[in-house]
């Protein structure tokens, strides 16, 4: 078996992996992007592309947007809801089968080689590089990027173990034309009924996505929770299609994302937002940051530490504040929902947060009350998910 040589191999062609491959290739590296699935493929995900995430997308991403969201309809424990609307777009809705294919093809256009339908069987260090073996081929690289999700093969093979709190979600799709029309520019968020998280309804082009997500301790109850949320939104859980469950890894501060010639990005690095459960923005940003550090590593033999530093400074602080805010919110979700309903100022801040015009840290600094509460929440309220 001959060995094909690349400067960098990226395992996993989700948003983080394809972004890393695209930016590495654009910087002159010879890159192989691999994924075990044949594209296009579905992926468990609500499919929300936030405005701030869209700023990290390559040109032409508008073609995979199916709905633009301007409003949110909030409810507490599936009781009567209220709506908050914005004059500006709050977020976009897409499907991962379209988004991920677009990003992989963007990486190809930048010069990366894309092998879909090729599973990584083993990874081992060899000399000054890494050997990646599949059923049909053997590859060698100087830099390996793990973008293969929570519990991915790359992290296990190189002994790089992210520390995180595990959450879980279950979702499905309903091809209901009336619901698509009713919710076409609005998302539904139900809080209080899912411990540690929320239920949702997101409209896509031809179907609605309904799901629940929260602490991993509720895993056995997910189906029942999904049935109740579905009924609340006027849907039959029995008619949901493409029912899928997935893990949401919530990074613990200081968790390693680099090893010897190896970087972890996206869900493989446990970069999911603790409050919203959204991970596409962190995936795109980590892919970009990893490529910057990777190009320096390929040219100098060092520099991966800059990626760890970048995660801590660019993402870590925001995710830490989000974690504290999530703890605080889960104590009394009804109270905070009432504040969102009655306070235009709080809704404005939430709009800015969702669009990426303000970060969690900015909101903390602007509030004389929220800052101390967040610090207390981080110290006094225990983690309810299972820690790894």
Image (cartoon, helix red, strand yellow):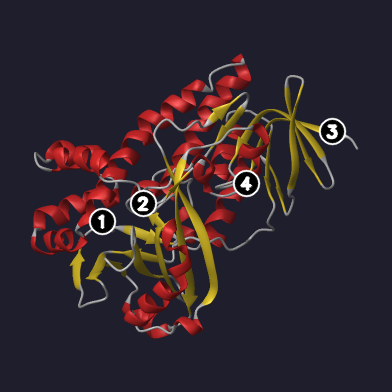
- What separation in Å lies between label 2 and label 1 (alpha carbons)? 11 Å
Residue position for label 3: 3
Q: Quadrant of residue 127?
A: top right
The residue closer to the viewer here, 303 or 185, is 303
Residue position for label 2: 384
Residue position for label 4: 12
Q: Is residue 112 above or below residue 86?
A: above
In this rendering, would 101 be left or right of 30? left
- What separation in Å lies between label 3 and label 2 (alpha carbons)? 47 Å
Mark 3 or 2, nearer chain start? 3
Density class for disc 1 (Cα within 10 Å; few <14, some 14-19, many ≥20) is some
Is there CB contact under 8 Å for labels 4 and 1? no
Residue 142 circle label: none
Residue 299: percent from left, percent from top: 61, 17
Residue 71: percent from left, percent from top: 25, 66
Residue 369: percent from left, percent from top: 10, 42
In this rendering, would 47 be left or right of 303? left
Density class for disc 3 (Cα within 10 Å; few <14, some 14-19, many ≥20) is few
The residue closer to the viewer here, 289 or 250, is 250
Q: Quadrant of residue 10?
A: top right
Is there CB contact under 8 Å for labels 1 and 3? no
- What separation in Å lies between label 2 and label 4 (alpha carbons)? 29 Å
Residue 330 circle label: 1
Name the residue rendered at 47%, 22% in the picture: 306
């Amino acid at each position: 078996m001959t060995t094909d040589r690349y400067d960098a191999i990226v395992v996993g062609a989700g948003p983080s992996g394809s972004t890393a491959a695209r930016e590495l290739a654009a910087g002159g590296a010879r890159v192989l992007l691999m994924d075990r699935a044949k594209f296009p493929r579905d992926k468990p995900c609500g499919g929300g592309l936030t405005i701030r995430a869209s700023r990290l997308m390559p040109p032409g991403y508008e073609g995979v947007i199916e709905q633009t969201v301007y409003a949110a309809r909030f409810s507490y424990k599936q009781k009567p809801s209220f709506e908050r609307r914005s004059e500006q777009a709050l977020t976009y809705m897409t499907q991962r089968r379209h988004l991920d294919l677009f990003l992989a093809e963007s990486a190809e256009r930048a010069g990366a080689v894309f092998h879909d339908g090729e599973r990584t069987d083993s990874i081992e260090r060899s000399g000054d590089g890494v050997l990646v073996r599949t059923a049909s081929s053997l590859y060698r690289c100087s830099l390996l990027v793990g973008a293969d999700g929570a519990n991915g093969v790359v992290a296990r093979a190189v002994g790089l173990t992210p520390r995180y709190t595990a959450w879980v979600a279950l979702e499905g799709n309903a091809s209901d034309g009336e619901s698509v029309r009713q919710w076409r520019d609005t998302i539904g968020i139900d809080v209080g009924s899912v411990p540690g998280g929320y239920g949702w309804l997101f409209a896509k082009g031809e179907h609605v996505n309904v799901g629940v997500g929260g602490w991993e301790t509720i895993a056995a109850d997910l189906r029942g929770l999904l049935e109740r949320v579905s009924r609340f939104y006027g849907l039959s859980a029995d008619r949901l299609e493409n029912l899928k469950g997935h893990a949401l890894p919530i990074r613990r501060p200081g968790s390693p994302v680099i090893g010897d010639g190896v970087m972890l990005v996206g869900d493989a690095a446990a970069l999911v937002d603790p409050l919203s459960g959204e991970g596409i923005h962190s995936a795109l940003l980590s892919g970009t940051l990893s490529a910057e550090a990777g190009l320096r590593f390929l040219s100098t033999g060092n520099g991966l530490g800059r990626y760890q530093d970048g995660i801590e400074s660019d993402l870590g602080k925001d995710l830490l504040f989000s974690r504290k805010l999530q703890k605080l919110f889960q104590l009394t979700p009804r109270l905070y929902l009432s504040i969102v309903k009655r306070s235009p100022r709080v809704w404005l801040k939430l709009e800015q947060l969702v669009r990426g015009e303000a970060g969690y840290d900015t909101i903390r600094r602007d509030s004389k009350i929220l800052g101390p509460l967040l610090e207390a929440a981080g110290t006094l309220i225990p983690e309810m998910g299972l820690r790894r």
